[in-house]
Amino acid sequence: MNKKNQSGAALLVSLIMLVILTIIGVSSIEDITLQSNMTRNSQFKMQAFNTALSESEAQVPRLLTEIVLLQNAMNDPNNTVAIPDTDFVMASSSNPFDQSVDIIYMEPSTDAGDDTNFSQGSAVAGGYSMGSITEAAYDMNSVATLPNSGSKSDQIQGLRYTAPAG
């Protein structure tokens, strides 16, 4: 074959194939990066959920033995008391989450004849009384947030405390 008869078609086809393969490679890298970010955020949200739920479950036995926190929530003007950070069970130097736990006293409903429905912020003071037993309802709101990630979990657990009246 003579060099004058060659038009460079093989070079042109090779360059086109190389451009196509480069585009496929770049789009694959972007897809992998997106999937990695989605997986990481999902893991952060699951960790936030587990941290908030574990803290909430760990505080229940403590609240039932240290009644003063429940009484403080009942006597607070906003019906809310925050558990101090130093009392968190899940707090440690390896835990990256910002946490908060609030105890909210749920006052009895003011609806006539409704002695089982509790709603926050009604005007009735004290707990529900039945003979020589007093019952009070509370919500415990446990929040875990990972700073600068948008990962947050807010877990609410209802508590009923029953005690002798008086």
Image: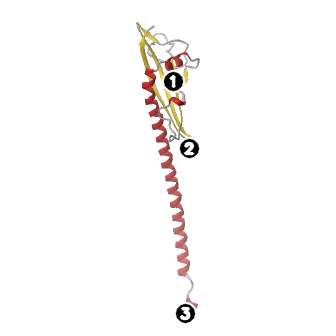
Q: For the point 54% across and 28% down, which residue is it?
A: 84
**148 lies left or right of 35:** right
Residue matched to label 2: 149
Q: Position of residue 4 (x, y in %)?
A: 58, 91
The quadrant of the image that shows the C terminus is top left
- State the mark number for residue 4: none
Q: Residue at x 43, y 18 (%)?
A: 161
Residue ID for mark 1? 103
Q: CA distance from mark 1 to mark 3?
A: 91 Å
Mark 2 to mark 1 CA distance (whole Å): 26 Å
Where is residue 120? Give x, y as percent: 53, 20
Q: Is residue 21 left or right of residue 131?
A: right
The amino acid type of the residue labelled 3 equals Asn
Front one among 89 and 127: 89
- Residue designated by label 3: 2
Amino acid type at circle 1 is: Ile
Q: Going from the N terminus, do you reach mark 3 or mark 2 first? A: 3
Of callouts 1 and 3, which one flags the residue occurring earlier in the amino acid sequence?
3
Q: Residue at x 52, y 22 (%)?
A: 104
* In front of the other: 24 or 151: 151
Under mark 2, the amino acid is: Ser
Tag 1 and tag 3, C-beta contact below 8 Å: no
Q: Residues within 10 Å of mark 3 (few under 14, many from 20)?
A: few
Q: Earlier in the sequence, mark 2 or mark 1?
A: 1
